[in-house]
């Protein structure tokens, strides 16, 4: 049984975690080149309870976890709280927040997309697992800047036994719906008032994420074929107004964080921040567009995954729908998630 002192320490750790994630920039794998923040991490739309909010200590287990599934979490079929589930890795580990080198000495968050190979189909079959590291180290190449330590529980596991896409993981963590916002209200909403959020599971204690040894592989129905109109988003409120009201694609909620595949799309803009590009449907009259980011497979340099000119057509483009900066962003896992390959 934990003492009051231990509980207080956990509460302080949770408060620090919430402050770290609010208003920071998102980036991909750590490198000495700053990424200017195409996708800052979402801010907790609620207040986590005192479970799994620390940094790498042994999980004391204040309350037993709820047994659940990836599909139920994506559907928002349960209340936020401590959960236990299994699923397969669907992406490499990537840095969810913040950009480095950076001038602050806070910790960093790393993540991985997951899916449930036992689910009957693609609908709602995806979540983002995130894991906090112990902090940062002074960047020897940039005075006053810091680099993320590569020691989150997820990275520690990967260092001991490499996690491959399709490997089964067993996870104990804290499920919640994350979004930009404060006071339990998301800055981005649908016209109905529903906050636009991402299903996220935080696993911050040593041993929270383990490999079962099973290798079910990627479910045969993933990536699932969708249209741009299924997953796009479009801001419809006045500029600068809060909350920001957006219209979402017809199947946005069904396919958030799910590995999807678009067909016959063309690049219409390459001026987006942080190596983003914009795509449109090349085969229909729809005017909807979608941002594509390189956050999951960030590489230093002059945007190696983005074409140098507009007009390029991709027969297929695969990635995970994510929501940030009041916009849906498709996140490919790398160059081979497109045909022809990116860029």
Image (cartoon, rainbow, N blue to C red):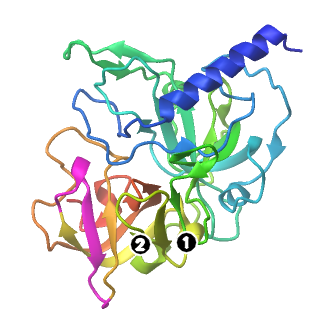
Magenta-colored span: 270-285
Q: In the picture provided, is 160 more to the left or to the right than 176? A: left
| Along the line of sight, the residue nearer the viewer: 74 or 102 | 102
| Along the line of sight, the residue nearer the viewer: 341 or 130 | 130
- The circle on residue 236 is 2
Q: In the picture provided, is 206 more to the left or to the right than 36? A: right
The image quarter containing residue 302 is top left
Q: Which residue is mark 1?
A: 191
Spot occupied by residue 272 in the image (x, y as percentages of width and height): 22, 56
> Given the current orientation, which residue lies at the most extreme left position?
309
- Look at the numbered disc 1 and give the secondary structure of its residue: loop
Report the quarter where the N terminus lies: top right
Q: In the picture provided, is 176 more to the left or to the right than 310? A: right
| Along the line of sight, the residue nearer the viewer: 194 or 291 | 194
Spot occupied by residue 188 in the image (x, y as percentages of width and height): 50, 58
Say if mark 1 contacts mark 2, CB within 8 Å.
yes
Is residue 231 located in the magenta-colored stretch of the structure?
no
Q: Which residue appears at 50% of the width and 40% of the height? A: 111
Q: Which residue appears at 52% of the width and 28% of the height? A: 19
Q: In the picture provided, is 89 more to the left or to the right than 36? A: right
Cα distance between the residues tagged 1 and 2: 9 Å
Is residue 244 in view? yes
Q: Residues within 10 Å of mark 2 (few under 14, many from 20)?
A: few
1 or 2: tag closer to the N-terminus = 1
């Amino acid at each position: 049984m934990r003492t009051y002192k231990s509980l207080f320490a956990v509460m302080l750790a949770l408060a620090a975690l919430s402050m770290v994630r609010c208003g920071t920039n998102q980036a991909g794998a750590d490198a000495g080149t700053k990424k200017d923040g195409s996708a800052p991490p979402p801010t907790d739309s609620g207040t986590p309870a005192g479970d799994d909010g620390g940094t790498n200590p042994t999980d004391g287990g204040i309350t037993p976890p709820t047994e659940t599934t990836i599909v139920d979490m994506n559907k928002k079929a349960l209340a936020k709280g401590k959960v236990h589930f299994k699923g397969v890795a669907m992406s490499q580990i990537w840095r969810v927040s913040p950009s480095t080198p950076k001038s602050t000495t806070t910790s960093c968050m790393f993540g991985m997309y997951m899916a449930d190979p036992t689910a009957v189909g693609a609908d709602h079959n995806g979540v983002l697992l995130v894991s906090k590291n112990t902090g940062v180290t002074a960047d020897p190449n940039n005075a006053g800047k810091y680099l993320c330590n590569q020691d989150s529980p997820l990275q520690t596991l990967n260092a001991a036994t490499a996690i491959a896409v399709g490997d089964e993981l067993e996870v104990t963590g804290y499920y919640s719906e994350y979004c930009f916002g404060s006071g339990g209200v998301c800055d981005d909403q649908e016209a109905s008032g529903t906050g636009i959020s991402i299903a996220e599971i935080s696993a911050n204690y040593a041993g929270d994420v383990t490999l079962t040894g099973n290798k079910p592989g990627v479910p045969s129905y993933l990536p699932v074929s969708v249209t741009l109109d299924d997953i796009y988003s479009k801001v419809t409120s006045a500029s600068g107004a809060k909350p920001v009201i957006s219209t979402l694609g017809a199947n946005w909620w069904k396919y958030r964080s799910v590995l999807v595949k678009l067909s016959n799309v063309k690049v219409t803009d390459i001026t987006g921040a942080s190596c983003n590009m914009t795509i449109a449907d090349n085969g229909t009259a729809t005017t909807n567009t979608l941002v594509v980011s390189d956050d999951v497979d960030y590489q230093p340099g002059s945007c190696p995954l983005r074409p140098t000119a507009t007009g390029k057509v991709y027969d297929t483009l695969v990635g995970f729908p994510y929501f940030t900066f009041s916009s849906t962003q498709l996140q490919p896992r790398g160059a081979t998630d497109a045909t022809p390959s990116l860029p």
